[in-house]
Image (tube, rainbow, N blue to C red):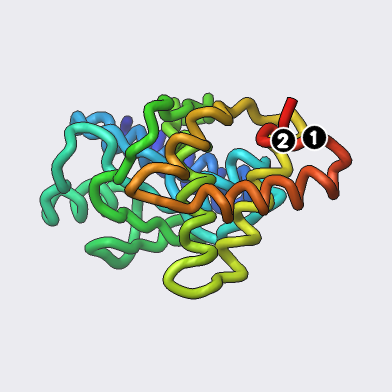
């Protein structure tokens, strides 16, 4: 990417009135910049939920992890790439075009499902698979203490999944929730049934 291209992209992102599209464009630009250095990033956490729910949930920043290669990005390289995007701050959090970008290290992923990809203005954006994301949010919502924000995230993701707007592998979600890494299937099942009742649809974990 030329500096002229980057400057035009930053101007476009800064002027976009839609917070969700603004975040998606910025994730796309950051991903493209690191991809030129042989590094693939993946959107995680609340930012991923924002993308999957098309802005029904707004995280307020862009959370990114390293997908490949599976090693931390050297500090100087992080600063160089982000400086090229006109970012301020570091070494893990920067302000770019009026939004905060957090680079959180190498992604932690246990689900067998693949990361998803979104076509965005400046290139593909990898997004952590919703199966991993949902189980992670449910865990954070109950341990080590109840967390209303994490529960709200999980509910928003469940709404789009149960409504059919987002295809998920319910079997993999169950396997992951029952695994030794999470051990929260009972809590997950309860939340799934709660949201299913509100939407007047059947829970994928109800008997056939």
Tell me the quadrant of the picture where the C terminus can be found: top right
Q: Looking at the rendered structure, which numbered label has been put on residue 202?
A: 1
| Camera-nearest residue between 82 and 191 | 191
Residue 17 appears in view: no
Left or right of 13 in this view: 114: left
Residue at image coords 66%, 42%: 53
Residue at image coords 52%, 40%: 25
Residue at image coords 64%, 45%: 157
Residue on which the image places disc 2: 206
User: From what the image shows, is residue 88 above or below residue 105?
Assistant: below
Number of numbered markers: 2
Q: Position of residue 198 (x, y in %)?
A: 85, 49
Left or right of 58 in this view: 124: left
Tell me the quadrant of the picture where the N terminus can be found: top left
Residue with the most extreme bottom position: 145
Q: Position of residue 58 (x, y in %)?
A: 63, 56
User: From what the image shows, is residue 76 above or below residue 143?
Assistant: above
* Callout 2 crowding tier (Cα within 10 Å): few <14, some 14–19, many ≥20: few
| Camera-nearest residue between 111 and 122 | 111
Residue 195 appears in view: yes
Residue at image coords 45%, 35%: 175
Q: CB under 8 Å between callouts 2 and 1?
A: yes
Q: For residue 115, what is the image quadrant?
A: top left
Q: Nearer the viewer, mark 2 or mark 1?
A: 2
| Camera-nearest residue between 22 and 65 | 65
Left or right of 160 in this view: 175: left
Q: Distance of mark 2 from mark 1, alpha carbons?
A: 7 Å
Q: For residue 203, what is the image quadrant?
A: top right
């Amino acid at each position: 990417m030329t500096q002229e291209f980057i400057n035009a992209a930053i101007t476009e992102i800064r002027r976009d009135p839609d917070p969700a599209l603004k975040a998606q464009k910025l994730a796309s630009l950051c991903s493209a910049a690191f991809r030129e250095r042989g590094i693939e990033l993946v959107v995680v956490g609340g930012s991923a939920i924002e993308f999957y729910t098309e802005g029904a949930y707004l995280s307020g920043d862009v959370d990114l992890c390293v997908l490949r290669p599976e090693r931390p990005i050297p500090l100087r390289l992080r600063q160089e790439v982000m400086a090229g995007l006109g970012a301020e701050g570091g070494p893990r959090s920067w302000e770019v075009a009026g939004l905060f970008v957090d680079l959180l290290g190498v992604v932690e992923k246990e689900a067998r499902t693949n990361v998803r990809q979104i076509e965005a203005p400046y290139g593909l954006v990898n997004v952590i698979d919703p199966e991993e994301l949902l189980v992670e949010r449910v865990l954070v919502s109950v341990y080590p203490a109840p967390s209303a924000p994490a529960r709200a995230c999980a509910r928003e993701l469940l709404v789009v999944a149960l409504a059919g707007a987002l295809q998920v592998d319910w079997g993999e979600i169950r396997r992951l929730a029952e695994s030794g890494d999470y051990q929260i299937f009972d809590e997950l099942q309860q939340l799934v049934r709660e949201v299913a009742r509100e939407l007047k649809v059947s829970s994928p974990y109800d008997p056939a």
